[in-house]
Image (spheres, rainbow, N blue to C red):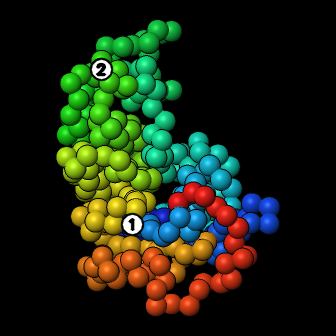
Amino acid sequence: MSDQQPLVELRGIRKSFGPVRSLDGVDLTLARGEVLGLVGDNGAGKSTLMKVLAGAVRHDDGDILVKGEKARFASPADARRAGIGIVYQDLALCDTLDVAGNLFLGREPRKGPFLDRREMHARSARILADLHVRVTSTRQEIGTLSGGQRQTVAIARAVSTRPDVLILDEPTAALAVAEVESVLRLIGEVAARGVGVILITHRLQDLFRVCDRITVMYEGRSVDDARISDLDIEKLVALITRADAEPAHEPAALGTETHS
């Protein structure tokens, strides 16, 4: 892959659910080591678009290119094999398992037919230390952790699979200030390793802390792309609400997607 070639490129992505068109020709690019903020009001199609990239939803039309090669994902496993990782808002952690068990859920190290718990905890400790994620112990149950700790463990789990692209859906929602700082620091560390990060968030102030660029979606379309250095909160809000623009198309044609 050349330095100029995007790590991921989405071209004209379309998706309908019955008569409801959720995505109507979305374009998006992501470079290696870049943090891209994906923003838009509720129903803009952000989550649907990321589910397409993560293999959870099959798109109807358009192209996905990963490192310049066309890809089409029939499942999340296909996307993971192509280097696409995602952390959903609900985190998909198991409260009754410990930290190490969650980090290696479904890919536990084994010694013969038996689970190698010593190796799993040792590797978990190394992963967390490498990412500067702090927990009391890898043997601590996930259900006893704070919201910020749970979020950083979920991100660490995704990063441990060595993705080229990491999608984060509302990672700082409902977190205390100190926990938000921890998550934002981790996002910066992940990007510094060359991972392309796509961040969905309604906390606009977070975008100015970690993002390099912003893509704005409106009613199922990508309508703006800007460097974060060219924006402030007021300009960004105007882009999201289309305060100074004509509607992308007739709202009646677009249904009622409830996801962000």
Q: Position of residue 49 (x, y in %)?
A: 57, 62
Q: Is residue 7 left or right of residue 178?
A: right
Above or below for 64 versus 231: above
Closer to the chain start, of discs 1 and 2, is: 1
Q: Residue at x 58, y 65 (%)?
A: 43
Classify 27 as above or below 170. Answer: below
- How far across and down, in percent of the image, does residue 157 sit? 38, 37
Question: What amino acid is found at the position of numbered circle 1 in the picture?
Answer: Gly
- Residue type at mark 2 is Gln
- Mark 1 lies on residue: 37
In terms of secondary structure, where does tag 1 sit?
A: strand
Q: How many marks?
A: 2
Instruction: Estimate the x, y position of residue 118 in percent, counting from the top left.
Output: 31, 13
Point 68% across, 56% down: residue:
58
Quadrant location, the N terminus: bottom left
**Residue 191 x, y percent position in the rendering:** 30, 57
Please give the name of the residue rendered at 24% of the width and 64% of the height, measured from the top-left corner: 209
Element type at marker 2?
loop
Report which quarter residue 15 is drawn in.
bottom right
**Residue 26's quadrant in the figure?**
bottom right
Dot label at residue 140: 2
Res 14 seen here: no
Neighbours of disc 2 within 10 Å: few (<14), some (14-19), many (20+): some
Asked if residue 212 is positioned above or below residue 203 in the image, the reply reads below
**What number is the disc on residue 250?**
none
Residue positioned 44% across, 66% down in the render: 38
Contact (Cβ within 8 Å) of mark 1 with mark 2? no
Of residues 143 and 71, the one nearer the viewer is: 143
Distance of label 1 from label 2 (alpha carbons): 33 Å
The residue closer to the viewer here, 181 or 115, is 181
